[in-house]
């Protein structure tokens, strides 16, 4: 199976937003010297009155966005995920979520998109941080299709939402007619031995690992868990019932993210299946590009295939 | 070190900055070129810091709040002998300790920065500790002008004035550009001097790319007893390379082969001119 490379998800986000905002002057984008990274320069040129710039001030970005949302604006607050969800966490928690101002908080260049720029520029904590904040939904699209669908869904979403996009071009994983619903995992592949539950840019390596494992007689289910809140609990339980092992994959710390969300569902539901959380371990993250970091921590077709085989305790192919 | 030696160093530093950015395929080119003269004067003329005394509690401290201009800092520290120039070949590479922002894994670096708006608070704390301990070291910190939109810088400024930290020297790299464009168009900063004065600083203006002017300005510290010092360093982003100067697009652009060759040629010419001027 050949996967076709699409665009970076954040480019698709920006293009979709521009398309929608041209028909709705109520849609506003708020940036913090981040329009270039967010591919929102065309938005600013086409709709200058619908882009608000606050300078390098992420706390202010979120607070101003919450104020705008309270006055009925459809606001997308766009900034690198790393700064947005650390520095402005209090504004997200209090001014957006707690006060129920339905801002679409958009974290761009997320995870380890910024690779060698180091820990200041990585967001490996955002799932954990925001999962614990009441009243904000979390979306992590895997490909261009999911990104577009997430933006369309966000437009009419009644609650605050966090959307997380990466910087690199991603593989297309879905056909355009795939049903998409907030809070409902998409099954990309059916299989009975192992289920990969992945989010965002780690879905493609999971798909490729499944392909590889099929070659050695291991059949895998692959779920794209594009929504971390509300969570598709049933899809996880079903995987436990119908397949022999579960591996979660995320571009996030192994603490507090997708993996632990699944673990808690399994434990509390009384499911005991071989289970492995793949993500970025709790250590000083290795220097390198996103791809090098993924490879280093086994978020790759090879790495995930090996993890699956170890979990099933079958021989590795030579 | 005499002025001409320092000027020649600045040219050499600019070459190294471009070389390591070119080699690694990433970097914050223009911001490093904008501030490198300031770092040159600080490390080679003003501060009492070297590989030999780096663990001495009495050393002067430099905290680079605009962490993205790390190539300038790595370059100057290599020249100071904290590590070899060759080590910088691994910049941004897999498993290298030379990541794209200042990190304490690299000998000579005081604080991990990269998220803007942290350096001034760190510097205030370090300067306050000197006062508590009766130590005479000074703390220097470099901020971008776009960075000043972060409210934390103004919070730290209030603490600096409140504790009368005249051992703190805040330098603003006032190149008038940030990523999106002119600071005054993105999020107006002016009247900047009035703001800093109102926050309790003793403020001086300097041409931040002029070695002599920088030596003179740092020589006057403390500007006013019991007040934190603030230097508005008027610089040119991309300084030294004609086609990079004062343009927003060079913020984190890597030169093409052709651009790189042209830039090095311009620097070679600058070097020849400086030597001829003796
Ligand atoms: C908290 C935070 N927000 C955003 C960024 C991304 N960023 C890196 S450099 C930069 C522009 C900096 O402009 P300025 O402070 O003027 O620096 P200079 O012109 O000297 O490069 C931005 C927005 C960051 N590093 N940290
Ligand atoms: Mg600037």
Image (cartoon, rainbow, N blue to C red):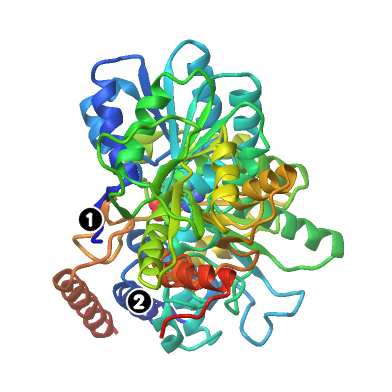
The residue under the point 78% across, 47% down is: B163
Quadrant position of the C terminus of chain B in the picture: bottom left
Is B205 positioned to the left or the right of B103 in the image?
left
**Up-down relation of residue A262 to residue A205 (above or below):** above
The label shown at residue B275 is none
> B78 or B254: nearer the eye?
B254
Q: Which image quarter: residue B50?
A: bottom right
The residue under the point 51% across, 78% down is: B77
Q: Which image quarter: residue B119?
A: bottom right
Q: Is residue A39 visible?
A: no
Pointer 2 chain: B
Q: Which image quarter: residue B62?
A: bottom right
Q: Is residue A20 visible?
A: yes
Pointer 1 chain: A
Is B25 positioned to the left or the right of A4 in the image?
right
The residue under the point 34% across, 74% down is: B24
Give the x, y percent position of residue B35: 42, 62
Q: Which residue is mark 1?
A: A4
- Answer few, some or many: residues within 10 Å of disc 1's Cα (few below 14, many 20 plus, some between 14 and 19): few
> B167 or A249: nearer the eye?
A249
Give the x, y percent position of residue A254: 62, 58
Q: For mark 1, give the secondary structure.
A: loop
Q: Which residue is mark 2?
A: B20
Task: Give the number of marks.
Answer: 2
Q: For mark 2, give the secondary structure.
A: helix
The residue under the point 27% across, 66% down is: B240
Give the x, y percent position of residue A296: 49, 73
Give the x, y percent position of residue A59: 57, 35
- Answer few, some or many: residues within 10 Å of disc 2's Cα (few below 14, many 20 plus, some between 14 and 19): many
In this view, the mark in front (1 or 2): 1
Is A98 positioned to the left or the right of A26 in the image?
right
């Amino acid at each position: 199976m050949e996967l076709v490379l699409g665009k970076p998800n954040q480019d698709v986000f920006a293009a979709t937003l521009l398309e929608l905002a041209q028909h709705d002057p109520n849609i506003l984008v708020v940036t913090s010297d981040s329009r270039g990274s967010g591919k929102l320069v065309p938005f600013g040129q086409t709709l200058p009155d619908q882009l608000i710039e606050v300078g390098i001030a992420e706390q202010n970005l979120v607070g101003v966005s919450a104020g705008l949302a309270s006055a009925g604006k459809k606001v997308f607050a766009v900034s690198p995920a790393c700064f947005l969800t650390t520095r402005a966490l209090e504004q997200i928690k209090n001014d957006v979520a707690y006060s129920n101002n339905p801002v679409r908080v958009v974290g761009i260049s997320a995870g380890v998109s910024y690779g060698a720029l180091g820990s200041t520029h990585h967001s490996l904590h955002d799932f954990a941080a925001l999962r614990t904040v009441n009243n904000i939904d979390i979306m992590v699209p895997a490909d261009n299709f999911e990104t577009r669908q997430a933006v369309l869904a966000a437009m009419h979403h009644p609650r605050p939402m966090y959307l997380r996009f990466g910087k690199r071009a991603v593989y297309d994983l879905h056909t355009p007619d795939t049903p998409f619903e907030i809070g409902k995992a998409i099954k990309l592949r059916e299989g009975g031995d192992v289920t990969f539950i992945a989010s965002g840019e780690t879905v493609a390596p999971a798909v490729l690992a499944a392909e590889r494992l099929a070659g050695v007689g291991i059949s895998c289910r692959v779920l794209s868990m594009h929504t971390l809140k509300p969570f598709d609990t049933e899809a996880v339980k079903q995987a436990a019932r119908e397949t022999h092992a579960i591996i979660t994959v995320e571009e996030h710390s192994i603490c507090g993210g997708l993996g632990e969300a699944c673990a808690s569902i399994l434990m509390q539901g009384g499911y005991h299946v071989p289970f492995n959380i793949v993500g970025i371990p709790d250590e000083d993250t290795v220097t390198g590009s996103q791809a090098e970091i993924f490879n280093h921590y086994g978020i790759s077709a090879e790495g995930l295939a090996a993890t699956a085989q170890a979990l099933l305790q079958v021989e590795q192919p030579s | 070190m005499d002025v001409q030696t320092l000027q020649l160093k600045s040219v050499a530093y600019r070459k190294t900055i471009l070389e390591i950015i070119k080699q690694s395929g990433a970097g914050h080119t223009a911001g490093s070129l904008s501030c490198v003269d300031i770092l040159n004067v600080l490390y080679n003329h003003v501060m009492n810091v070297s590989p030999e005394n780096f663990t001495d509690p009495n050393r002067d401290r430099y905290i680079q709040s605009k962490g993205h201009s790390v190539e300038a800092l790595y370059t100057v520290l290599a020249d100071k002998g904290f590590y070899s120039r060759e080590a910088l070949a691994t910049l941004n590479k897999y498993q290298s300790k030379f990541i794209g922002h200042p990190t304490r894994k690299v000998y000579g670096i005081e604080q991990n920065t990269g998220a803007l708006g942290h350096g001034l608070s760190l510097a205030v704390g370090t300067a306050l500790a000197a006062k508590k301990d009766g130590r005479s070291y000074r703390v220097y910190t470099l901020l971008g002008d776009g960075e000043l939109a972060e409210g934390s810088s103004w919070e730290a400024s209030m603490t600096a004035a409140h504790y009368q930290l005249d051992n703190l020297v805040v330098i603003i790299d006032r190149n008038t550009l940030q990523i999106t464009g002119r600071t005054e168009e993105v999020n107006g900063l002016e009247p900047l001097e009035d703001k800093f004065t109102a926050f309790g600083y003793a403020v001086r203006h300097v041409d931040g790319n002029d070695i002599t002017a920088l030596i003179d300005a740092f020589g006057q510290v403390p500007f006013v007893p019991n007040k934190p010092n603030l230097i508005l360093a008027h610089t040119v982003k991309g300084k030294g390379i004609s086609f990079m100067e004062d343009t927003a697009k060079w913020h984190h652009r890597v030169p093409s082969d052709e651009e790189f060759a042209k830039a090095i040629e311009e620097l070679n010419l600058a070097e020849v001119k400086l030597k001829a001027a003796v």
